[in-house]
Image (cartoon, rainbow, N blue to C red):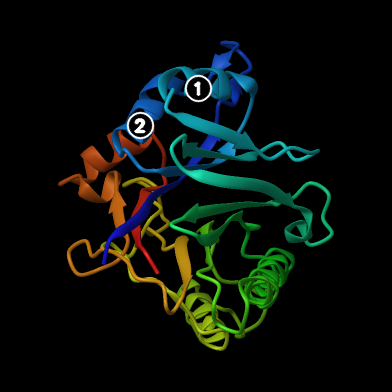
Amino acid sequence: MAKAFSVASWNVEHFGAADKQKKKPKKPVKPIIQFLASQNADIVAVYEVVGSIVFDTIVTEMPGYQFHITEGPQTQEILVGVKKHLTSFFTQRLEFKSGQETLRPGALLTVTVDGTSYPLLFLHLKSLTVPKGFGLRDDMTERALKFRTALDKAAGGAGKAPYLFLGDLNTMGMNLTFSNKDVSGAEEIARLTKRAQGKKMSVLAKRHEETWWPGSTSSLQPSNLDHVVAADHVGFKQFGGAPVDVRGWPQEPTAAKKDAWAAKFSDHALLFFEVQKV
């Protein structure tokens, strides 16, 4: 199958947030943007973007892209860039805030290739393992899955929309005080997988399962937080036997080098995939 487009999806924690004492970003912005640009993806999505300094730098370093950014009272935005040769339409979807004013909206990008429209919904779901955080993720995920019904209708029939939703889905589980009813991160992912199957969608396999690195001295373990969920009839290029490549700290050979990569860039790895024409 021929390539339709490629996507790089990356959570860069507090990207552009200022160090109040030094009055400049906590991490240098330019190296992060250069790493993103080096992926040469047709579409890029960056989560947790803070401040206009990121936008100014990224349009300078990546001049071949048209950029869009979510906006509102939330402090961390989703930035989406599309190569200028692609035909696309961007909208901000407030229903994915689940009624919480400070949560991020969904960023919906519809890309048209050879007459076929591919809807991509970029999401950064609520974190935290407390019941409220789990409940909000559950609601936002359900909205993302149900959204396929509307997209299918627009595409002319059930199962026709080549729909994907992706991003930092924060599948970290839920902890209950004084209870044996905790939900592990793996169980939350299994639940997402089962729910997706009901909509004829799949949680795509990744070349490396864990996408978040807490640091080698942390009591926490690396976690599987970032995902791509796609309609079953959409095809993908394979990377080492998986449709999603995971780039960044997982490629470093030692814990010390993983720490160094995360300190320079992000504690999240970058997801890269290539959609084939439907």
Quarter of the figure with the N terminus? bottom left
**Residue 72 falls in image quadrant:** top right
Q: Residue at x 41, y 55 (%)?
A: 219
Up the image or down, 3 lies above or below 86; here it is below
Mark 2 burial class by Cα count in 10 Å: few <14, some 14-19, many 20+: some
Q: Give the residue number, with chain letter if any, for mark 2.
A: 37
Amino acid under disc 1: Val
User: Measured along the vertical axis of the image, is residue 12 above or below residue 238?
Assistant: above
Which residue appears farthest toward the top when viewing the image?
22
* Residue 277 locus on image (x, y percent): 37, 64
The amino acid type, in three-letter code, at marker 2 is: Ala
Left or right: where 141 falls relative to 213: right
Image quadrant containing the C terminus: bottom left
Q: Nearer the viewer, residue 223 or 182?
A: 223
For the point 27% across and 42% down, which residue is it?
258
Considering only order in the chain, which callout, 1 or 2, is on the residue closer to the N terminus? 2
Does residue 4 lie above or below 257 as drawn? below
Name which quarter of the figure residue 21 lies in.
Answer: top right
Residue closest to the eye, 254 or 156: 156
Circle 1 sits on which residue?
A: 59
From the top left corner, tell me how far across and down residue 150 is, in percent: 70, 73
Q: Secondary structure at mark 2?
A: helix
Residue 182, horizontal then vertical, whole percent: 59, 79
Marks 2 and 1, how far apart at CA = 11 Å
Q: Which mark is residue 249?
A: none
Could you tell me if residue 104 is visible in this image? no
Between 41 and 256, the residue placed more toward the observer is 41
Give me the residue at 75% from left, 40% from top.
74
